[in-house]
């Protein structure tokens, strides 16, 4: 029987994200005069300003083959926090590109709990086994050598993001 416990952590910096490169500062009135480039509208710019952070406790229990049985159970408890989304296809623009940390939140990839278990049990029928050790070749080919397997996976769901549409900060 083998047991393993480990800590895993990583930090991603300078990750790619689209931002509005011509965002006006919040305030009253027409946002166009407050833009860095007043003659342009919203301008999509790809920049390396996103970040991510992962920390996880991982545990594994494994029983190697003995008496026809082997099994493994894996569990992880973790948190994934990012700014700007979870990758190129699911990234989002920040609410305020002048304050990126305001968008720091649980990642779409966050799964706090992940459990997986698998097992293999060789049935005790056939040559060299508990039952049927006297099987002839044909009987052993039909009745011997069978095994039962199973896999179980469970995980918590992804975070729910609630948003409010509109230009509440009047940034255009």
Image (cartoon, grey):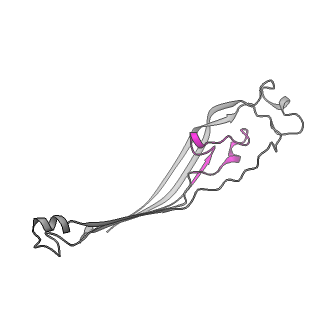
Q: Please say whether residue 63 is visible from this viewpoint.
A: no
Residue 30 in the figure: left or right of residue 36: right
Q: Nearer the viewer, residue 135 or 158?
A: 135
Q: Position of residue 106 (x, y in %)?
A: 62, 53
- Determine the residue positioned at 80% across, 23% down: 39
Q: Nearer the viewer, residue 70 or 3?
A: 70
Q: With respect to residue 81, does 100 lie above or below?
A: above
Range covered by the magenta-colored residues: 80-108
Image quarter (top left, top right, bottom left or bottom right) of the N terminus: bottom left
Q: Please say whether residue 145 is visible from this viewpoint.
A: yes
Q: To which quarter of the image does residue 13 belong?
A: top right
Residue 166 in the figure: left or right of residue 110: right
Q: Nearer the viewer, residue 117 or 151?
A: 151
- Determine the residue positioned at 27% across, 66% down: 147
Residue 28 in the figure: left or right of residue 113: right
Q: With respect to residue 105, does 2 lie above or below?
A: below
- Residue most extreme to the right: 29
Report the number of numbered marks: 0
Q: With respect to residue 47, does 78 lie above or below?
A: below
- Residue most extreme to the bottom: 131
Does the stretch in magenta take in 92?
yes
Q: Position of residue 83 (x, y in %)?
A: 63, 45
Q: Position of residue 94 (x, y in %)?
A: 69, 42
Image quarter (top left, top right, bottom left or bottom right) of the C terminus: top right
Q: Position of residue 97 (x, y in %)?
A: 71, 38
Residue 118 in the figure: left or right of residue 10: left
Q: To which quarter of the image does residue 126 belong?
A: bottom left
């Amino acid at each position: 029987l083998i047991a393993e416990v480990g800590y895993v952590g990583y930090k991603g910096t300078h990750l790619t994200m689209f931002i509005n490169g011509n965002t006006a500062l919040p305030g009253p009135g027409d946002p166009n005069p407050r833009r860095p480039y007043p003659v342009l509208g919203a301008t999509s710019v790809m920049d390396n300003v996103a970040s991510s952070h992962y920390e996880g406790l991982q545990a594994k229990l494994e029983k190697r083959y003995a008496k026809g049985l082997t099994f493994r159970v894996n569990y992880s408890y973790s948190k994934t926090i990012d700014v700007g989304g979870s990758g190129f296809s699911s990234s989002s623009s920040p609410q305020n590109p002048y304050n990126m940390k305001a968008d720091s939140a649980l990642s779409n990839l966050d799964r706090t709990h992940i459990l997986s278990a698998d097992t293999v049990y060789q049935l005790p029928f056939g040559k060299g086994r508990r039952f049927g050790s006297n099987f002839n070749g044909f009987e052993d080919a039909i009745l011997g050598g069978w095994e039962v397997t199973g896999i179980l996976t469970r995980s918590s769901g992804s975070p729910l993001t609630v948003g409010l549409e509109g230009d509440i900060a009047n940034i255009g």
